[in-house]
Amino acid sequence: MKLHNFRYFFSVIVIIVYCVTFNSPVAMSENKKKSPKTERPKIAAVVNGEEITQEELDDVFKQEEKRTKSKKEQLSDSQKKKLKTKILEDLIKRALLFQESKNKAIIITDEEINKKVELFKQRFSNENEYKLYLKNRNMSEDKIKFAFKKDIAIKKYIDKYVVEKVEKQISISENESKKFYDDNPKYFTQPEMVRASHILVKVDSAATDSEKNKAKKLIKEIKQKLDKGDDFASLAKKHSGCPSSSKGGDLGFFGHGQMVKPFDDAAFVLKVNEISNIVKTVYGYHLIKVSDKKDKKQLSYKETKNKIVDYLKRPKIKKVIVIHLENLKKSAKIERYL
């Protein structure tokens, strides 16, 4: 846990381990209230009238089973049964939290949702790979947007109506925070980092020779303009195929290994304000400009105290969230058909 990953972040994922946003195509569509009597064979649970389908449960289970197999682990029948029960309870908690967010009229903007979608798309090397992912899971972008809407709503609800109410009541002493700092020096090593911007001309993995040549021509033309003194940020806004284009290509600070290797290798040898030659990655062609650098160093207690205090509060707030979820379950009408 390096310090640059040390965040005060109370995601519902801390509590609901198996409710990964993109596991289930069924989770992508808003459930309508139906009678459990007519649909009972296909329903795993009904939470205050909202259905959790067997298909949704099975899909999440398959993803978890696949993950255990990738670790060369084999689940016994009893372990599978326990896992399904655990997943169902997590889906119930997720449903309850989303219902509460609607009861509290939590507002989610299109801008917030679209930002999440764009970040998710960056997990794919190109648009075709992203579309194939959707097709294989019988999903649409509207379903993905609804899933993100749920995630954002749940987090906002927890932050506002659970965390904020108890955070001020939880105190961490100077001795506690200092002891944590002294006992864990490796957590407070800031790695070498660079702040870089880039211009990306995307090239699809299935691109034709003609399309590849067109992309090469464009990136070369952009490089020529930069060599003549044209503004990097302006060219990024105009030509870059990365979501960072809206910020002039700025990717912020990152450490070794956070970017694909060719990009990483090029960025870390550049001097401040220097622009790279054309760099090819799986995403296409890049031009990279480094705007700042940070050397590796050991951060002081004073620099990290606030983050340590936030971090040490997390288990205590997590406990409050667990209690809150249990109270929601007690007051809810929940029917299980597993």
Image (cartoon, rainbow, N blue to C red):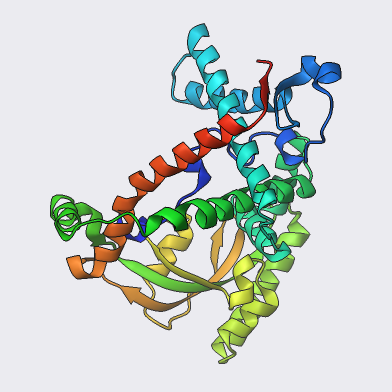
The reply to whether residue 295 is in sight is yes
Q: Residue furthest bottom?
A: 229
Left or right, residue 118 beside residue 250: right
**Quadrant of residue 119 in the image?**
bottom right
Count how many numbered circles sit on residues in the image: 0
Q: Residue at x 52, y 7 (%)?
A: 77
Residue drawn at x 34%, y 56% as measured from the top left: 169
Residue 80 x %, y %: 53, 14
Q: Quadrant of the C terminus?
A: top right
122 with respect to 253 (left or right):
right
Instruction: Please state which of residues 235 and 93 is positioned toward the viewer in this rendering.
Output: 93
* Residue 17 in sight in this render: no
| In the depicted structure, whether residue 97 falls above or below residue 223 | above
Residue drawn at point x = 82 percent, y = 33 percent: 33
Q: Residue at x 68, y 59 (%)?
A: 108
Farthest residue to the right: give it: 38
Q: Position of residue 96 (x, y in %)?
A: 63, 38
Task: Residue 60 in the image: state x and y as whole percent.
Answer: 62, 28
From the viewer's perspective, is 70 left or right of 308?
right
